[in-house]
Amino acid sequence: MIEPWLYPALTAVAVLTGFVDAIAGGGGLIMMPALIYTGLPPHVVLGTNKVQSACGTAMATLRYRRAGLFSIRPNLPTVAAIFAGALAGAMVIQRFDADVLRLVVPLLLMGIALYTVFSPRMDDHDSKARLSDRGYLPAAGAVGFYDGFFGPGAGQFYTTTLVGLRGLGLTRATGLTKLFNLTSNVASIVVFASGGQVLWLLGLCMGAGAMTGAWLGSHWATRLGARLIRPLLVTVSLGLTARLVWSWFAQ
């Protein structure tokens, strides 16, 4: 059990989490330390966080879909690959430690930050795709597995691969990332909930806050595009890197 005052406090934190997630991903940078502070077991923290994240991502997905940034039907094979990958990842994390990823992921996030700063592709113009839709499936499934297994930075990985491999403009990639994030979140919830690792009341309270933040974040992202998304993507990637490195050495 957690203290009653933590419900409104964590719901308020989730507003900021949803705002950041809707634009650049990486809301776990904010929410995970807050949940860990409650003293909940690690797997309950992961499962409950997935609930609030799914709520906020669902709102962002709806907003980006209505803005015409992506269509669902052509992306159904990719959604299926991500769902399968995330299911597998969420099953594996309940049996293994994620310490190796805490060392590797900061290096990948640093790479994303550098790519975002220096690549001419990271704007709102579509470019030539390096992989077909079918060729992208293994990469999508791998990110889905990572999101189910560990999670931090998954949004950045989706967005960067969509820009670098599929040739999407940054705002379009951000919109489609929300659909992919939602898919891996739902798959993870199925696994964590089946293992009794979700506090539903807390997760749904935070979910209401995350939906509010996601509505605001997606509104500004569709208005400002890469001018807002690009610097926030760099900032969140570097912030996640710093937090993961700090947690590694703190252990």
Image: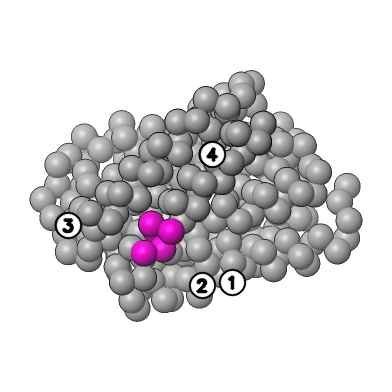
The Cα–Cα distance between marks 1 and 3, rounded to whole angstroms, is: 33 Å
Verify CB contact (< 8 Å) between mark 4 and mark 3.
Answer: no
- The kind of residue tagged 4 is Val
Residue at image point 56% right, 70% down: 213
Residue with the mark numbered 4: 245
Mark 2, residues whose alpha carbon is within 10 Å: few (<14), some, or many (≥20)?
many
Q: Tell me which numbered mark, 2 or 3, is placed earlier along the sequence.
A: 3
The Cα–Cα distance between marks 1 and 4, rounded to whole angstroms, is: 30 Å
Residue at image point 81% right, 43% down: 39
Verify CB contact (< 8 Å) between mark 1 and mark 2.
Answer: yes
The Cα–Cα distance between marks 2 and 4, rounded to whole angstroms, is: 31 Å
Residue with the mark numbered 1: 212
Residue with the mark numbered 2: 215
- The kind of residue tagged 1 is Thr
Mark 1, residues whose alpha carbon is within 10 Å: few (<14), some, or many (≥20)?
many
Verify CB contact (< 8 Å) between mark 2 and mark 3.
Answer: no
Q: Quadrant of the C terminus?
A: top right
Could you say where residue 245 lies in the image, as x and y percent from the top left?
Answer: 54, 39
Q: Tell me which numbered mark, 4 or 3, is placed earlier along the sequence.
A: 3
Could you say where residue 129 lies in the image, as x and y percent from the top left?
Answer: 14, 47
Q: Nearer the viewer, residue 117 or 206?
A: 117
Which segment is the magenta one? 231-235
